[in-house]
Image (cartoon, rainbow, N blue to C red):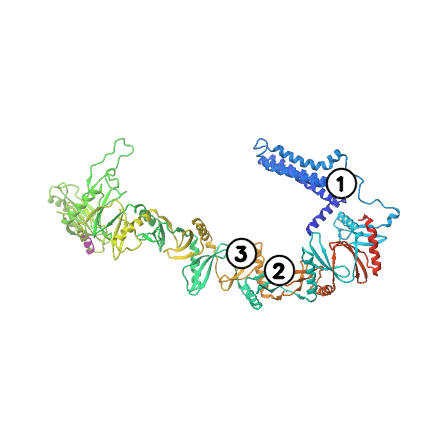
Amino acid sequence: MASRTDFHQSLFQLYEHYVGEPDSSKDVYGYWLFIVGYIIGAAGVATFVVGYAGEGNPYTLIRISGVTAATGLAFCLLGIVLMLPVRRRGIQVSFVGLLISLGGVGFFAWAYPYNWRQLGTDYSVEVISVYTLGIGIIAGVTALVPVLTGQKGMFVEEEGKTDDPPILTGDAMESAQFAVFRDENGDWKWHVLHLEALAQSNESAVTRPDATEGIERVKSQISSAGLMELTTSAFRLYEDRDGTWQWTLARDDGSIVGSCAGEFDERDGAEQSVSFLKDRGPDADVIEIEGAAFTYEERRDQWYWQLVDDERAPLASSETGHSTQERAEEAAQTFAERFDQARVLDVEHIGVELCERADGWTWRFVDADDEVVANSTDEFDSRRDAEKAAEALLSALESASVTVAGEPTYELYESGEEWRYRLVDENEHVVARGPEGTPEHDGSAEWADQFGENARDADVVEIEDAEYEVYPATGASAGGSAASTPDDDLPATVEEPEPAADGGTTVDAPDADETGPWHWRLVTDDRDVVAASTEPHADAETATTAIERVRQQASEAELIEFENAAFQVYEADSGEWRWRLIDEDGNVLADSGEEHTSRGDAAEAMMTLKEQAPNAELLEIETAAFELFVNEDDEWGWRLIDEAGKLVAEDPSTHPTRGAARQAMNRLLEYLDSDVRTMDRAIFQTYATEDWHWRFVMPSGDTVAVDGEDHPTRDELVDGLDDVRDAAATARRSTIGDVSVQLYGNGEWHFRLLDRDRAEIADSTVSYPDREAATDGVDALTAHAPDAPIFAIEDAVIRLDGDDGWSWELVDRDREVLAEAVDSAASKDELLNAIEEVRRLAPMAGRVDFDVASFELVADDDERWRWRLIDEDGRTVASGSETHETVDAARDALENVRDLIESASILEIDSVSFELHTAEDGWVWQLIDEYGTTMAESTQTYANRTDAREAMNDVKAQAPDGWITFTE
């Protein structure tokens, strides 16, 4: 209200300074409305001119400038109407025109450009018509109506016609005069003069029209005013302009010392308030709160405490009631102690709480609403152990992968410095694993891919002791001649196959089987390779033939052992004789280069070179032979060569001793007659230890998967492979770290946290309506995990709540609310400041009882003191109207008020009346309106009651006909 009055006064002062003295307030408002309209209209025109020269959207430019300019024109015209001598009826009609014109402006803003002229539905005529009608009404009030009717009095005041009385001359000067003048603040006050100053205004007016209006009101009501004589203090009951009842307490001199704190809908309510003050006021204690205090009240047989500041603003209150007041006081003191030490629990998204249980410590996730999101599964011996586990979890949770229970998944994980994988089926069983670790992630990923791509079509094979496996080596070089170049126009030709050393043939690449060159190997049931082919073969049949030749030659082979290089004399396939020098690894160092007709010729040619290698042994090959040899690393091995000296088979590995190499050779002989099996696809190889197991072997012989669980019988293993096939073929691949998140649910969805060994770390306590919502919840958890605070509630914490405004609660470790804020704050920073204020005030708060009515001394923003009366519920019943510089002065004034309350009578004001009051040195009078407001008062104190009454009667008789003069 004060700001509105200041604005009103500023407008009048500026008008008086730059224009002149206004005749009425509408002159001032009309002038400033005209200025505002002019500025708005000019802004619209300027916007169009400046924008038209630019590169902006022309439709938007016209729309904005049109709305602005049209609005400014309407305001300008209305301002002119207000400045002209137009009657109230004309102003009302002008406002109707303003609303119509603004409606036209809004109509234009909606219609342009898409419903204007050629675009869309054309509303241009309607828009212009509405706006023109509004402008026409405003202009017609002052111009057209007087011209057309010839009567200026309908809307416009006629010249010379006024409600003021005629100029008084002669004896008429005996009537009263209202002299209006400025006070020291520049506001207007008035005196009633009749030979002397008899009365004066009680309050100043901001403007001259306001002063005139107040005088006219006094003149119209003073003649009917009654008379009340007050010799003691009194309560004035009156009905205000808005229909509510109020009261004031006045001294016997008419000055107001107190008033009711609220308004009452009924007269009885005001009377009850007065009765309460008269009954309780004289004996009520004075309560003084320094800083803060605890108050106690009983509600429904329960006692509650509340912390209030020195202005009785509530800062905190108890959440639960107590059986006695003593218990409530103990709770208040406990609150003060706990609150001072409690930390602020500021969880913006997610936090980790360390909790002490009977058997140790655990942790749990809590969200911003302090709701438990997930509980840890493990318990820890100490709080520090639980904290370390939470810290490790949070650091790993940000990058945690998300899997879904019931969906087969390849989980790739790091174990030590190696990467491994496992296959988890829809029942959460690990049904397959990688056979071993790989140094790189891609190695295990490739194994998982191979298993998934080949599992459905893989055969189930059981190897009894050993078997020959004939398999394609896709991509291996088969030897032979190269195909023709792209520039060759002739068809590609292929040479005749060359016999392979082991009895097969080496072929050119174009003639190879579609699956690629073929090889064979002899493997045991535990996948030890006993022997393998040394050359590729064109097809599986050729490779099988080579196996038969190995069987034949190995069964007839003799054992030859040498540790150094050796000369061999052998008969070639053509029947001629040749020689060669081989090292201990079987590598050919030199050969005869030509064929000889007899062994002797070959031996004689060889002896020529033997002189250069005297340590080389002499070997004569008449049949196939096994050779035991030692390589440069002192590792031993064996090889099978035919009677022509060609390599037929060899040991796929080396051995530390000659004996071990011989044992390996004997294994070939042991398994020489094993079955032959073509392995053109991957297999599930079953084998038994104490239980049955399987391994998944690719045609290359690489084992890429093994089973994840034992099987008591082979039949059960085979029956379960169908599920393994389906899981392997449909599983998606997921790389997991130290922690992974798994979604699970049937109807409602939850999540759990798993470590790299699939052991459960934590399980969610919240549920989600669908998988998407659960995924969003997990995403929020993982996104905010790095910033999650870790905390433990030793005694109590201050929990923040920002759902509906910002507030706080003091809770213990069991989440029992011990206290809470009474009012909410607009922002988090404001709430934190309020918490610090409670921390400061709570320890020093004393005890205050408001179980009876009490007086309280309070200071305003200007450090001025006044009193107020508070009832048992803490509501303010009455407050002092006068302020004092010090609290002692306010206390002294209150003691005087007690006496006034006790002796005060009750007056009901229902009309304007004169009141006669006793003053310190005489009598004074006041004119009070029906709302209890002082309209005028005597200018002096009269020696006796009679003089005061005569002056009052003189004003009553002369003022209604008084005339008004203004002086600066």
Residue 795: mark: none
Residue where numbered disc 2 is placed: 313
Q: Observer-nearest residue: 523 or 214?
A: 214
Whether residue 315 is in magenta: the answer is: no
Instruction: Evaluate if marks 2 and 3 touch, with contact meaning CB atoms under 8 Å apart.
Output: no
Q: Is residue 512 left or right of residue 814?
A: left
Between marks 2 and 1, how big is the CA–CA gap?
53 Å
Residue where numbered disc 1 is placed: 85
N-terminal-most mark, 2 or 3: 2
Of helix, strand and loop, which one carries label 2? loop
Between marks 3 and 1, how big is the CA–CA gap?
60 Å
Residue 801: mark: 3
Q: Amino acid at mark 3?
A: Asp
Task: Using the image, determine if residue 403 lies above or below residue 886.
Answer: above
Q: Observer-nearest residue: 22 or 739?
A: 22
> x%, y% of residue 857?
67, 63
> x%, y% of residue 470?
22, 45
Whether residue 661 is in magenta: the answer is: yes
Within-10-Å neighbours for mark 3: few <14, some 14–19, many 20+: many
Residue sticking out furthest to the right: 170
Q: Which residues are magenta?
A: 659-665
Task: Using the image, determine if residue 569 lies above or below residue 258.
Answer: above
Within-10-Å neighbours for mark 2: few <14, some 14–19, many 20+: few
